[in-house]
Amino acid sequence: MADLSEATQFGLHCAADIIRHSRRAVALTGAGISTPSGIPDFRSPDSGLWEHFDPFEVASLTAFRHNPEKFYNWMRSLAIKILEAEPNPAHYSLAALQTLGCVQTIVTQNIDMLHQRAGSQNVLEVHGSLETMTCTGCYQTVKAWDFVDAFLEKSEIPHCPNCGAILKPDLVLMGEQLPAKIWLQAQQASKQCDLMIVAGSSLEVLPVAGLPMRALENGAHLILINYSQTYLDVRADVVFHEDVAEILPRIVEQVGGGGL
Ligand SMILES: [Zn+2]
C-alpha cells in the first residue's frame, strides 16, 4: 500500500472522528466501489462495454422492448464480469462500519450485489439488481439464477415459465423509473442521516446524485471518497480523491475496528 500524504492522513483522522460521533450514517456507493472488483460502470461510455454498442440503442427501456436479443447480447459480458467478481476491501470496510454500528444504511447505484456478499445489511439498490427478473407479459418476478446457465452457455434468452413472454432483468435501464419503494426509503434515509459517506460515485447520475444534497440540507456531515471531483466537493467536510479500496480500510482502522 502506498505511503499516504500528510493531507490524506489528516483527512483520515477527521473522517474517523466524524464517523465515531455519528448515529445515523448512510453510505452512498457508485460504480467506483466495484471497479476494483473488475466490474465496469454499465452507464459509463468509457467503461469498455460500449465499444460496439450505442447505449441508447441497447440499454434503454425502449431498446429493450424493440430488440431484447440485442440487449441480452450486450448484457452477456457484464453478467460474466459480475458473476466472476468478488467484493473488495471497500465493500468489506462498509460492512465492518455497519457491524461497528457506525453506518446504518447503504444506498447503492450498483447492480452487482457485492455489498450483500461482503456481509452488509440494509442495502437499498436504487438502480435495481441482477438477482431477479420480471416478466414483460404477466409481471411475475422470478429468480434470475435459474436462467443464468442456459443464457450464458446456450445463449437462450430468458422467457417466463408462466406465460412465455420475455423476462427483463430488474435493473434500471435508461429512461426507466427507479423502483418506487426503494427510492422512497433512500430519500428518507438521506434526509434523516447525520452523516453521508459517498464512496465511488462521481454524483453525475440523477436523481441519485441529489441525495447528498438532501442530507446536507438537513445538517448532515459529508465525506466524499472518489477519484474524480464531484459537484459537492466544496460542501464536504472531508474529500479524498483516491482509491476507495485503499481509503475505506484505513478509515475503519482509525474508527477502531482493527485492520482488515
Ligand atoms: Zn409471464
Image (cartoon, grey):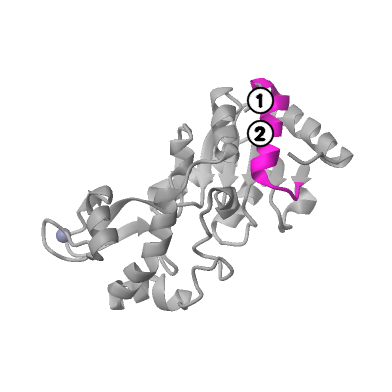
Give the amino acid at mark 1: Gly
Q: Residues within 10 Å of mark 1 (few under 14, many from 20)?
A: few
- One can see residue 219 in this view: no
Q: Is residue 245 magenta?
A: yes
Residue at mark 2: 249
Q: Is residue 240 left or right of residue 78?
A: right
Q: What residue is shown at x 60% (from left), y 52% (from top)?
A: 32
Q: Is residue 143 left or right of residue 89?
A: left
**C-beta proximity under 8 Å, tags 2 and 1:** yes
- One can see residue 189 in this view: yes
Q: Position of residue 225 (x, y in %)?
A: 69, 46
Q: Position of residue 209 (x, y in %)?
A: 60, 56
Q: Quadrant of the C terminus?
A: top right
Q: Is residue 138 magenta?
A: no
Q: Which span is picked out in magenta? A: 240-257
Taking the image as four quarters, which one is ligand 1 found in?
bottom left
